[in-house]
Amino acid sequence: MGLVHYPVYNKKCERIASATTTVDIHDLSRVARTYGVKRLYVVTPLTDQQRLVGRMLEHWKVGFGAKYNPHRKEALELVTVFSSLEEAVEDVGGAEGEIPLLVATDAARQEERSITYGRTRQILRASHVVLLLFGTAWGLDREILDRADYVLEPIEGVKEYNHLSVRAAAAIILDRLAGGHHQS
Amino acid sequence: MGLVHYPVYNKKCERIASATTTVDIHDLSRVARTYGVKRLYVVTPLTDQQRLVGRMLEHWKVGFGAKYNPHRKEALELVTVFSSLEEAVEDVGGAEGEIPLLVATDAARQEERSITYGRTRQILRASHVVLLLFGTAWGLDREILDRADYVLEPIEGVKEYNHLSVRAAAAIILDRLAGGHHQS
């Protein structure tokens, strides 16, 4: 999984680098750990943000937090910070010996390269390496959506309301893609 | 839905009243709004916490936040604060003309009164009024689990890791119970 802070949109649909949010990293790493995701890439080009995340990871992985709550340590061990999506993709390639398929997520339906949850589950079951990308702020920039191999269909609830937090969206998407109940 | 701050467990398995967390209320209300939940009850007996949540709701519902981000307003309009579960149950009864079934959630499997997601979906489709309870901190106190009509089976990922945030757990559970993809 990748949690992308650049390039993403702000409220005015401008391209920005968003600030990292520790609760996002905690929640997504716990979701990743639950559903057997191998790594969570936090992507930010801002060096102060990289340092902040590094300090937070240090606290929970080797500092006081590691003793205080080993479950957080277990989850946050999946997290690494990279400056760009390119570097994250290269890291996956190096670790897995295979260039990952890039599957982006978006709250809006994309006509091109849209992929269903069912089809994505098939790809995962066939043991393809997938990097699933989540955008912070107002979502992934068009540049990333265009670059992705696929864009996952949006989460649709029962209401015309489509404004979940990235924490809630990532939890639901991982459950749909990797939750055991779909196999029955 | 009910987000319960008392009685819940702390890390040492003692009964406590937990502090409210604004990100929980934001995330759960957005999930509630997405899946057509009618109300989100924030249950806390602590008057300072009730005031804090009240101030936060005021900001987003009628203050600056309502203009800044109307989607949050739309979600937070579902939220009300009550001192006790009893009061929340009474409020549901008054609004719906029916005492709600209490369905508690827990990270551990409960032998007694355990209910599956499929069975709970059937109950909801039959238009029964359900109050779905989520615990903060280390989870709902035994008193509430014993009092509930049912305890929903835990979320199982693919790993022996069972430490999702209440934000992630509520998102997944609502998607399993009310997500449109289960009807296909």
Image (tube, coloured by chain):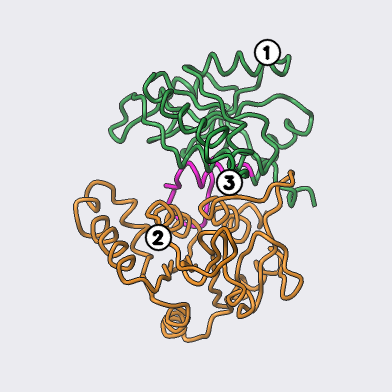
Chain colours: A green, B orange
Residue B161 is situated, as x and y percent measured from the top left of the image, at: 69, 47
Q: CA distance from mark 3 to mark 1?
A: 31 Å
User: What kind of residue is marked 2?
Assistant: Thr
Q: Chain of mark 2?
A: B
Q: Height in image: B92 above or below B71?
A: below
- Pointer 1: what residue? A94
Residue at image coords 63%, 42%: A174
Q: Nearer the viewer, residue A22 or B87?
A: A22
Q: Which residue is mark 2?
A: B20
Q: Give the extent of the magenta segment.
A: A154-174
Relative to B22, residue B106 above or below: below
In this rendered view, identify the residue nearer to me: B133 or B72.
B133
Q: Say what secondary structure mark 3 lies in.
A: loop
Picture coordinates of residue B3, whole percent (x, y): 47, 65
Question: Disc 3 residue type?
Answer: Asn
Q: Which mark is residue A69?
A: 3
The answer to whether marks 3 and 2 mark residues whose Cβ atoms lie closer than 8 Å is no
Q: Is residue A91 magenta?
A: no
Chain letter for the residue marked with disc 1 in the picture: A
Q: Position of residue B132 (x, y in %)?
A: 55, 69
